[in-house]
């Protein structure tokens, strides 16, 4: 018998048991124990302590009352969070005093209690208040890396063959400005960083065809204040192709052309960081599908 069925059965015999004579109660207990499988003493306790139509007790919230009501700060907090490009709660806490004057210019003055609450709110409270909004506006860059398998045996995996204390060894990656869909043509950013100095270069390219990427990499190489010694990339077909292989190896001083392991983003940790700080934080995740831009 399920717990729900047992409760319904107890409700059915409770009134009879309560109004029965001692001799009748003995018969009801015999029936109750046989039906539910209870020990006789336990059955007596259940029937004596049973209360019909009782609502569960309401427990008062422990601790001190809240310093402010969340609804009075949620609207300005959400607007500032969106305008600041979705920072984490600890960063949002720091920039709130800097952004509030501009907020009041656009949306009008805030009540003093709301302003004080925004200045006192903790990062943990910010996380709790913005949790539904984060789900709504959560977006990530979509990967468009298609593996280039033809040259994997000719282009070695980068291990420890570089002297990374010398300038000239670059990590490279492409960042797709595709929005929520990778269909059609859109812009990419070719991002490069020198491991020793942190020197970064970015170039825009329409699509990521082999020749277009090669032309932008040539321009990046000419802009570097030091000679290019090594080039490391992921396994995308925009990098692993004969155009780049010939460009880096068919010269008087060949460039060390290496690649990372497949599905190991930490192999290119330097450029993954620059993809965020130098591309995403400036351009966001919007779709750029107009060549004139």
Image (cartoon, rainbow, N blue to C red):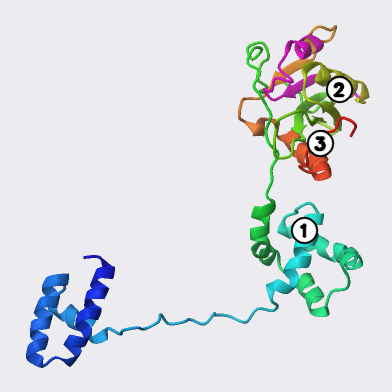
Q: Magenta stretch: residue 225 in it?
A: no
Report x, y in % for residue 36.
17, 71
Viewer-side residue, 147 vs 8: 8
Residue at image location 30% in from the left, 85% down from the top: 51
> Looking at the image, is mark 1 or mark 2 earlier in the sequence?
1
Report x, y in % for residue 148.
66, 18
Q: Which mark is residue 290?
A: none
Reading the image, the residue beneath label 1 is: 81
Element at label 1: helix
In three-dimensional space, the C-alpha distance between marks 1 and 2, rounded to whole angstroms, equals 35 Å
Reading the image, the residue beneath label 2 is: 216
Q: Magenta stretch: residue 232 in it?
A: yes
Instruction: Tell me where the magenta segment starts and ends, as one range.
Output: 226-247
Which quadrant: the C terminus?
A: top right
> Looking at the image, is mark 3 or mark 2 earlier in the sequence?
2
Element at label 3: loop
Residue 230: quarter of image: top right
> Looking at the image, is mark 1 or mark 3 earlier in the sequence?
1
Report x, y in % for residue 3.
27, 68
Report x, y in % for residue 80.
80, 60
Residue at image location 86% in from the left, 62% down from the top: 99
Count neighbours of disc 3 (C-alpha within 10 A) and say few if under 14, some if 14 to 19, many if 20 or more.
some
Looking at the picture, does residue 124 appear above or below residue 225?
A: below
């Amino acid at each position: 018998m399920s717990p729900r069925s047992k409760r319904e059965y107890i409700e059915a015999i409770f009134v009879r048991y309560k109004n029965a004579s001692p001799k009748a109660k003995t018969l009801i207990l015999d029936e109750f124990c046989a039906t539910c499988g209870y020990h006789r003493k336990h059955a007596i306790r259940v029937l004596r302590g049973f209360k019909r139509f009782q609502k569960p007790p309401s427990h008062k919230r422990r601790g001190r009352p809240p310093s402010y009501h969340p609804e009075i700060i949620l609207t300005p907090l959400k607007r500032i969070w969106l305008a600041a490009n979705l920072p984490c709660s600890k960063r949002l806490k720091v920039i709130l005093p800097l952004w509030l004057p501009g907020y009041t210019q656009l949306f009008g003055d805030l009540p003093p209690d709301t302003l004080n609450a925004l200045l006192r709110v903790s990062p943990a409270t910010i996380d709790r208040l913005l949790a539904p909004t984060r789900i709504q506006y959560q977006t990530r860059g979509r990967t468009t890396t298609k593996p280039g398998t033809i040259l994997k045996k000719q282009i070695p995996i980068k291990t420890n063959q570089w002297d990374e204390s010398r300038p000239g060894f670059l990590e490279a990656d492409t960042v797709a400005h595709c929005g929520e869909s990778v269909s059609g043509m859109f812009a990419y950013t070719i991002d490069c960083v020198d491991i020793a100095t942190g020197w970064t270069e970015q170039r825009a390219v329409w699509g990521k065809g082999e020749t277009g990427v090669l032309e932008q990499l040539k321009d990046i190489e000419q802009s570097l204040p030091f000679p290019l010694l090594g080039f490391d990339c992921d396994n995308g077909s925009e990098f692993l192709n004969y155009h780049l292989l010939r460009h880096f190896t068919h010269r008087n001083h060949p460039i060390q052309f290496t690649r990372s392991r497949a599905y190991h983003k930490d192999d290119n940790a330097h450029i993954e960081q620059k993809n965020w700080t130098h591309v995403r934080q400036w351009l966001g995740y919007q779709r750029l599908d107009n060549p004139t831009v």
